[in-house]
Amino acid sequence: MVKKMSVPLFLLFLLSILAFTSIGKVNFSGEWKLDKEQSNLSDSPLYLSKIVINQQEKSVLTTRTNMNQYGEQYPFDEEITLDGEESEIVIYEMTRRTRARWSDDGKTLLIKSKTKYWGNSGEQEFTVDETWGLDKKGEILSIDFDVKTVDGTNTGTYLYKKAEE
């Protein structure tokens, strides 16, 4: 009888560990629109005006829409794995390599990307570090960013409100 009890107890223990490790990871899924008044847009003429996120167990699918000061939109789709492995896409003839991982507490997503492009002096690269977070109610998405180019560094915070469904 002891052996029969040990298998169910072991399974219960294993399930409780698996449930505990997934607790705390936030879900960023939704359509998010930039709150310009609350955001720190930095000095860049191009900013992320909207992002649609479909978070899955092992990846995040995004449609990012960048906008310039003239209202022109530049959308692109990207799938980023959440295991720290590199993902690669081509955006408007620029190669972008991205890695993402969860913070230790599972409350923020850390995304690092490198994009190669052709500038006036040949091939160049810019890097972007992003930290995604949600407020406690899940209504505000914050993206802290740090962009490094040959011309310098741009930092700021975008705040997004969840679009009505």
Image: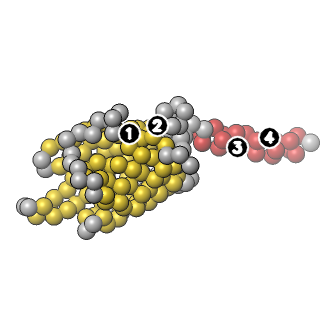
Q: Are marks 1 and 4 in contact (CB under 8 Å)?
A: no
Q: Are marks 1 and 2 in contact (CB under 8 Å)?
A: yes
Closer to viewer: mark 1 or mark 3: 1
Q: Residue at x 38, y 55 (%)?
A: 64
Distance (Cα) linking label 1 and label 2: 9 Å
Distance (Cα) linking label 2 and label 3: 34 Å
Closer to viewer: mark 2 or mark 3: 2
Q: Residue at x 65, y 43 (%)?
A: 18
Residue 163 visible in rendering: yes
Q: Amino acid at mark 4?
A: Leu
Secondary structure of the residue carrying numbered label 3: helix
Q: Residue at x 41, y 51 (%)?
A: 51
Q: Amino acid at mark 2?
A: Ile
Quarter of the figure with the N terminus: top right
Q: In terms of sequence position, does the residue under pointer 4 or pointer 2 come before the other? A: 4
Closer to viewer: mark 1 or mark 2: 1
Residue extending farthest to the top is: 136
**Residue highlighted by disc 3:** 14
What's the mark number on residue 35? 1
Q: Residue at x 38, y 39 (%)?
A: 35
Residue 131 visible in rendering: no
